[in-house]
Image (cartoon, rainbow, N blue to C red):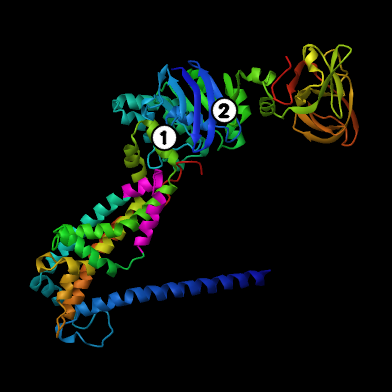
Amino acid sequence: MATVQFKKIIKKFGDNLVLNGVDVDIKDHEFVVIVGPSGCGKTTLLRMLAGLEEVTDGEISIDNLVVNELHPSKREIAMVFQDYALYPHMTVEENMNFALRLRKMPKAEIDARVAEAANILQLNKFLKRMPKQLSGGQRQRVAIGRAIVRKPKVFLFDEPLSNLDAKLREEMRVEIAKLYQRLNATIIYVTHDQVEAMTLAGRIVIMNHGIVQQVGSPIEVYRKPVNLFVAGFIGSPTMNFLSGKLSIADGVTVFSSESVTLPIPAFVLPQNGTWDGREVVLGIRPDDVLVEHPGGEKCSGKIEGVLEVCELLGHRENLYLKVGSQRLLATVEAFFNRSPGSAVSLCFNYQNMHVFAKDTGQRISE
Amino acid sequence: MKKKISAAAKKRYIRHLLIHAAIIAVAVACVYPLLRILSVSLRPGDKLFSMDLSIIPAGATFSSYARLLKDTMFLHWLWNSLLITLATSFIGVSLASTAAYAFSRFRFPGKKAGMILLLSSQMIPAGMLILPLFLMIMKLKLMNTYLGMIIAYSVSSLPFSIWILKGYYDTIPRSLEEAALVDGTSQVGAFWRIILPLSTPALSIAFLFNFTTAWNEYLVARVVLFSAKQYTWTLGLFELQGQFITQWGMFAAGSMLVTIPVLCVFLYSSKWLISGLTLGSVKG
């Protein structure tokens, strides 16, 4: 296994700047998920590591060896493609042993490796079949098997589950997590699905517009998003945002918007004279909007709102609320027995409140 | 309700009937001349101009075939044709397959102009190319040689073959080659091991096109070849047509015989002409 370093990576397609100074260090045996919206440059970054795209500027190293000019086959990486990319004229077995045959490995060793991978992925029964005779999930397994047999330094996964239906995606996600535990390999996994990122990653790299927004463990990026983009991208359902202004009254920082006025405790935003008049965005996750809650020390005062729509999800329920002109989403325990249009009181959980500067979008709260 | 269904069934029946009638009419129009030639080739020498319409004529004989093979150099001409045609087809397909790959996969200056130029070269009538071809082959000192013919034929079929193959390559997902590159092949290796095996339907079409074009060609052969020993069958057959008398029996027999290689090539290549080879490679 190996370490991977991206140093000041720049990628341009003509005049279009796709990656703008990406710096990421990936440790040995680490499972790193690169996540971001479509067009953020995450797949381009992965393809550059694989050697399928040229690097405009910067350095990519695998195990401290700069690989910018190295042919893909010499990088000792294996890649699982979004669309599987199985060779349609070869059987499952031939697909899996293709790379080993190219290396002129002894037949006994090839067979042993294929059998081992087929065992792990439960593909034994399908070795003689052609790709077109397999289901989507089985094809994806073959694509993963093709990577495993190589025993590469780094595994690259390019949105491997995006073509599967929801149920299969969930199954394969668990399979990949198990595989990681078994192989303990360095894995770089690209996805636009934040659920995959949160569930699989040891560390998440969040990208937008070709720039790395935040690198951290799933819980770090969830609890302490560094900016508005990360706050809005990570977490489902999406975080509520309230735009407003800060003021200082009697030594207490107060947030006021058109619809809501509430004091911000010092453990959320340390008292600081410069906050007065500052335009900010308050971020509260739907789980932290407490509806008909007795309140308490760590909660804001009561805010009156109107219930607009209820969405029952089974064990949870999404409540779409309106506070003045502000729309808010709250997620509560299922069976919130109130009809749309009824008045509700709510409060915010201060412990998970986020404050961002409106002009820069950067986090200013603790 | 019942009445409605039967009316729909009747409509469908009439539609099928019309389609089948049209197919049969076209099939008859295609096969009839062939059957007439077969009939003429089997007639005894004294009944060549008979108005009899039967396919197997009364007193059918293979004498025209025997005379053609015994009294003329027909087998030699057939061999010449086969040699030139096969060489043309292999060279033409080899050049076209690599050129089309470059047009399909790489970015280079003049790519679009090149494709348009290739297409426009197909708009020039074959007769207009005779003079330049004659001059080129003469300057290359390849008059009356197989090589001269092979060069002329393979070059003239290239544009069509390139277009066919480029169009086919475009449908093959790039991720297959990329997977091969990551697996350890070179770019040429990916082309050889992945793209070519997947392109057999298009390669077969290009091969058949090259084969039939070269096999049936007359005009260029007339200009380039001038000794009977070098003749292709088209020129040879024409020799049977005299100023005052034409050996119609032998002519028809020759015409029947030359269809055999084409038929064999078509039958053989039909197994490669299966579509959907890339099924299952990527998400579907």
The chain letter for the residue carrying disc 1 is B
Q: Which residue is mark 1?
A: B179
| Residue A177 seen in the current view | no
Pointer 1 local density, CA inside 10 Å: few below 14, some 14–19, many at least 20:
many
Which label number is shown at residue A173? 2
Residue A135, placed above or below residue B94? above
x%, y% of residue B150? 20, 58
The chain letter for the residue carrying disc 2 is A
Residue A332, placed above or below residue A94? above
Q: Residue furthest left?
A: B71
Q: Image quadrant for the C terminus of chain A? A: top right
The magenta segment is B97-122
Q: Is residue B109 magenta?
A: yes
Residue at (49% x, 31% y) in the render: A11
Q: Amino acid at mark 1?
A: Ala
Helix, strand or loop for the magenta stretch, by majority = helix
Q: Is residue A12 magenta?
A: no
Is A148 placed left or right of A294 in the picture?
left
